[in-house]
Amino acid sequence: YHPYVLVCFSSQVPLAMEILIAELNKVCIYTVPKYIIYSEAAFQTKEAYYKAIRYAEEDGKIESTDSYVDRLSGCMKLYGALVQTEADGCQNLHGLREGWAWIARFLNVFPANLYTAAALQAFLEMAGFALHKRYKTQFRKLLDIIARDFLTALKDRGDAKLIKVIVSLRSYIESNQFLNEPEGWRLRCSLESHNFAPDSDHDQQYHYQQNRFY
């Protein structure tokens, strides 16, 4: 289903949104957001760790990292599309306030690596426009933190596999791609039995902790 259908339906059946978010969290831990650090003490094998972070397994074989990253990106795009969706006559029960809380927590606790970079890029591509529309200067400051600290930490890892996502994230920020309205953002949904007022623009605070990216 398209996110606007889910938003409209869950505005009448709130439990539906709770179930959807719970299912997304099961499939992709980064939608929580949650990060699991690998350690030999916690995991007997690398495969055990991969399973913990939701690598798929088929016929006893763990999927490739490329497949995993593609799948987590898809989940994050769905999550980003969900939080940024606006529909007339419907209240988004997991909207921009939750999206802002997600990205603030992400920058506070997640290390910079291939998985987290892919998750961040996918989320921004879908939700960045609406987040900027709502939070304006605060959102731009957050992008400055990403450019200054998160991307620097990625580059410092010296991993050739990160070049593509570094270039993509830097391009997103420097070319102001968040000003481009994503396709389908203004889809309408009218529910005669409900008439919700939009959320007020509360100033949301985020807290950045130095060295969290290492």
Image (cartoon, helix red, strand yellow):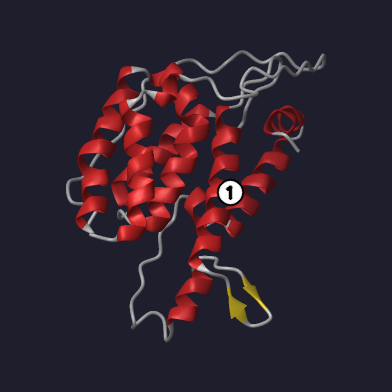
Give the residue at x 78% y 15%: 190
| Residue 18, quarter of picture | top right
Q: Position of residue 103 (x, y in %)?
A: 40, 39
Give the residue at x 36% y 44%: 105
Q: Position of residue 35 (x, y in %)?
A: 40, 59
Is 193 placed left or right of 16 in the picture? right
Q: Disc 1 residue type?
A: Cys
Towards the viewer: 196 or 131: 131
Q: Position of residue 31 (x, y in %)?
A: 51, 49
| Residue 159, quarter of picture | bottom left
Q: Position of residue 109 (x, y in %)?
A: 31, 51
| Residue 151, quarter of picture | top left
Is 92 placed left or right of 131 in the picture? right
Give the residue at x 76% y 38%: 1
Whether residue 94 is visible, yes or no, is no
Residue wearing tag 1: 75
Residue 77 lies, with reference to residue 48, above or below; the image says: above
Is 187 placed left or right of 130 in the picture? right
